[in-house]
Each structure stands twice: as C-alpha cells, then as structure tokens.
Image (cartoon, coloured by chain):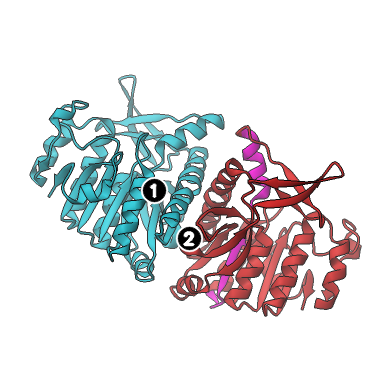
Chain colours: A red, B cyan
Amino acid sequence: MIVVKIGGAQGVNLDAICADAAQLVASGQQLIVVHGGSAETNEISTRLGHPPRFVTSTSGYTSRYTDRQTLEIFAMVTNGKINTLLVERLQKAGVNACGLSGLDGRLMMARRKDAIRVVENGRQMMLRDDYTGKIEQVNSLLISLLLSAGLTPVIAPLAISPSGEALNVDADRAAAMVAGAAGAQQLIILTNVPGLMRSFPDESTLIDRLPKTGLEQALSFAEGRMKKKVLGACEALDLGVQQVIFADGRIEHPLQAAMAGRGTVIA
Amino acid sequence: MIVVKIGGAQGVNLDAICADAAQLVASGQQLIVVHGGSAETNEISTRLGHPPRFVTSTSGYTSRYTDRQTLEIFAMVTNGKINTLLVERLQKAGVNACGLSGLDGRLMMARRKDAIRVVENGRQMMLRDDYTGKIEQVNSLLISLLLSAGLTPVIAPLAISPSGEALNVDADRAAAMVAGAAGAQQLIILTNVPGLMRSFPDESTLIDRLPKTGLEQALSFAEGRMKKKVLGACEALDLGVQQVIFADGRIEHPLQAAMAGRGTVIA
C-alpha cells in the first residue's frame, strides 16, 4: 500500500498524478491520497474578507492561526473544493475515489492545541481559541473497509477532537499518521520542488538518499514548509513505514518516478 | 430505515434534528441524511463576485443555472461547509456520521442536462454549459457498507456523470432516489414550514394526509420550492418508499414529531 500526499502549491501536475494513480490502482496497488489546501484557503479567505494569519511557534514551526471562522473557511475550501474536485479528477481518470475528512467516521482523532505559545515581533505570547490539532489516532478500520470495497480514499486535512470539534491539522503529518495506521510501505510526498535540498532553493544540493538518523539534522536546514514534511517523515518511519519519498509533483509520471527512487528517499 | 432530508432554509433547528437523530440511531434505527445548501451557496457566491442566476424551465420548475464556476462554488459550500459542519454537529450529538457527495464511490450517478429550455422575460431560450443533472442510479452497496459499519451517511447534493463530471442535483429528488435505492420505509423532508399547504402561506390550509393519487393535483398548488418536493415524494413512492412526510424542521423533536405523523403524510 502507498500513501500519496499531494501538495497544493503552484505547478503540481494533478492530471499527471491522477493518470499515474489510475495505472497503479489498475495494476492492483492500493492507494490512499491525502491533500492540503493552504494556498487556496489563503486566497478564498482573503476574498471573503477574513485574510489568513500565520504564527510561528517558539520551536520555529509556522502554522495557520485558526479561529472558528478560519476553520469554517478551511473546511469549506479543503473538504469542499479541493477534495471534491480531486475526487472528480480521479474519477475521470478511472479511479473510484472516495473523499473523506477526518471527521467522517472519526477517521482522524486529534488533540486540540487550544493554547499555543507563539513568537510575534520577537515577543512570546499565548494564542487561544485556536482550532488546530495534533492527530493521535487514525481509524484504520474505515480505511480498510473502503479499500476492500475497491475505493481509493482521498483525505482532507481536518480531524475531530474527542468532544467532536472539527480541527485543522497539518496535511503532511496527517499523511504520515495515515500511512502508519494503514501499514503502508511507502509515503510519497509530492511538492513543487525536486526533493529536500541541503541549501534551498539550490537544486544542485538535492539530497538523494537520507538515512532516518539524518532527519534530525535535516530539520535544521529544511526551509519553512519543508520542516513539517521532515517531521512527518520522521513520524511515518517511527510508525513502521519503510520509505518516505519527497518527490517532484510537477513532472510527467510523478508517482512512477518517485517509486523508482527519484527525489529524496528516506529509509 | 429512514431517510431525512434537511433543508437549508432559515429557522431549521439543526441542534434539535441532530439530538433526535442521535436518539433514533442509539435505538437501533438506521438513518441516512441528505441536505441542501441553496441559500448558503447564494450568499457565498455573491460575496465571491459570482451571484446566482435562477432559471425557470418551460414546465415551470425553477433551478440554479450552474456554469462551471457556479458548480465549483456549489461543491465548496454544500460538500465543504454544510456537509462538514453537519457531520461535526452530528458527531457532537453522538452520531458517527460520514459525509459523502454523489461523486464519492460514484454514489449518485446522473445524466447531465447539458441544454435546458428556459423561459426568460416571456421568451423561450436554450441554455448550454449547465452542470445540472438528473440522478439515474444510486450506489446502494456503498450505503449498505457504511450503515453496516455503524456509520450514518450524510449526503451532499452533487452527482457524477458517466464521464466523471461533477453535477449539481436537486437535494429533495436526491433524497427520494436515495430512499428508494436504500429501501427506506420513510422519507422525511424537513423544511421551515409545517408541511404542504393548499394555499401557501396560510397554515390553516395545511394538508394532513395525502394519497399518492393526490400528488399530481398538489403539483398545481405547491408554491416554488415545494414543487420539487412534491415531485420527489412522487418519485420516492414510485420506488417503493412507504411514506413521505413533509415536516416542520423548526420545532423541538422534529423527527419524532414527523414519525408520529405531524406534517403532511403522503402514502
């Protein structure tokens, strides 16, 4: 089984990804898709008069400040627009896709981080009323049920708290948790860069192979959004996933290339 | 099994509906929820600079003109916002809800009406590029799979064409098709009125009981949006559903009241 995380960044070739997915599924490969939606949420929330606000935690990770209104827009865009249109695109390519968010059947249970310590203008402060979560459990039974019915789950990055609240979760780390729970052999994280670079954005510094022991060091040089992918890779390997591949989602046959080892292979 | 259609009109008491749904599911009753989203789609599409346009067919039915941009907004709002937040509300009430649109697992297959004859300013004209469909088949296997896993399907009014396109479908008629395919005994259509009135909006003309043979006549006096509900009732009864109930979604215990025969019961 393979989990594919599709990033929402510009340049990612969805048609090529869906064509590859269709070939894989037709050959009997079980596939689970997880997607993000940050860029499109930013655009639509701005157009709706509620522009995004990003905060940096004291440990240096950037995340979306998610008040209730932002959460609802995030749900609308990721689970309504991106998920539905990705399911449509996969269906057109011949994949019997089934869209889900982590709320459906309590697919992804998360702990709400209701107070986060952030740094703004060099000063530490606590932010409350944030609807962001950290996934603690994935309902692998529901995933198995869908896969065994010949469906390909397509998962939006929303989770549910123990009390039933919708929460915004990081899509890369959600993909890692899903891959671990489902017993996937590979987690392929498709982005609009060729992989992890020692010195971003210099592509000549692309790292081909990285042992798990090199991940901690990678956290220090990974730029912005790549940091959470590295964290996700670490979590996936800890959960028994054999390979995590950071691969280029802009090329033709992006999945086949990633499975053949193109990109950054972490094992 | 009961199919409940929840309208998006103002005044509908979602908390009361979810509380009733939780009691029913806890008592072993299988439930399927279908919802609309017209009002909220109008609001958000207007805010996004693409206001809705309604057309009236030559046979007198009003529907949303759905160009591709409208379709994407409709998908975003109904499947992303309304569906996700309804699943959240049901989960909070203790119902293990699972949100779906008709694209997921090809749940609702529809024929695209790519050219519709409409009347505008008294003149007939053909509208093309419309992404509206008429459901022809419901994947009852997927519904059974979810129900037997203890999940309550919550369905957004989008269908899929044979070539894999997303289509806007009427939620009342979708509920009727789902009820028929799933072998439901009752279809409860909750709105913000007490039921079908012989002379809308005079509530003293509420019709308590209506035989199936009275439906054709009802089409002549049903006002605007009620017309399609009458059509849906007709279709559901044709498909073997025993009772269709038009009931008030604003009151406490709206489902229990409907099941006890409050509203317009058509059988």
Residue B7 x/y as whole percent: 34, 41
Quadrant of the image occupied by residue A190: bottom right
Query: Which three-letter amino acid code belongs to the residue tagged 2?
Result: Asp
Residue A78 seen in render: yes
A190 above or below A76? below
**Mark number, residue B34:** none
Mark 1 belongs to chain: B
Nearer the observer, A254 or B142: B142
User: Which element type, helix, strand or loop, lies under badge 1?
Assistant: loop
Q: Where is residue A266 in the image (x, y as percent from the top left)?
A: 78, 75
Residue located 78% across and 74% down the image = A265
Specify the subunit that label 2 lies on: A
- The residue type indicated by label 1 comes to Pro
Q: Is residue A34 magenta?
A: yes
Question: How far across and down, in percent of the image, does residue B28 sit?
Answer: 28, 66
Q: Do labels 1 and 2 share a chain?
A: no
Q: Are marks 1 and 2 in contact (CB under 8 Å)?
A: no
Classify 10 Å Cα crowding around label 2: few (below 14), some (14-19), many (20 and above).
Answer: many
**Residue with the mark numbered 1:** B157
Write the residue at 88% across / 57% down: A200
Q: In which quadrant of the rendered image does the C terminus of chain A lie?
A: bottom right
Tell me the CA gap for discs 1 and 2.
Answer: 17 Å
Task: Indicate the secondary structure of the residue bearing disc 2.
Answer: helix
Q: Taking A123 as reference, is A259 above or below it?
A: below
In the picture, the quarter occupied by the N terminus of chain A is bottom right
- Please name whichever residue, A195 or A118, is drawn nearer the observer in this view of the structure: A118
Question: Which residue is located at x 70 percent, y 80 percent?
Answer: A242
The residue pinned by badge 2 equals A104
Q: What stretch is highlighted in magenta?
A: A26-47
Is residue B247 left or right of B207 when viewed as pictured?
right
In the rendered image, is residue B101 in sight? Answer: no
Q: Is residue B237 left or right of residue B53?
A: left
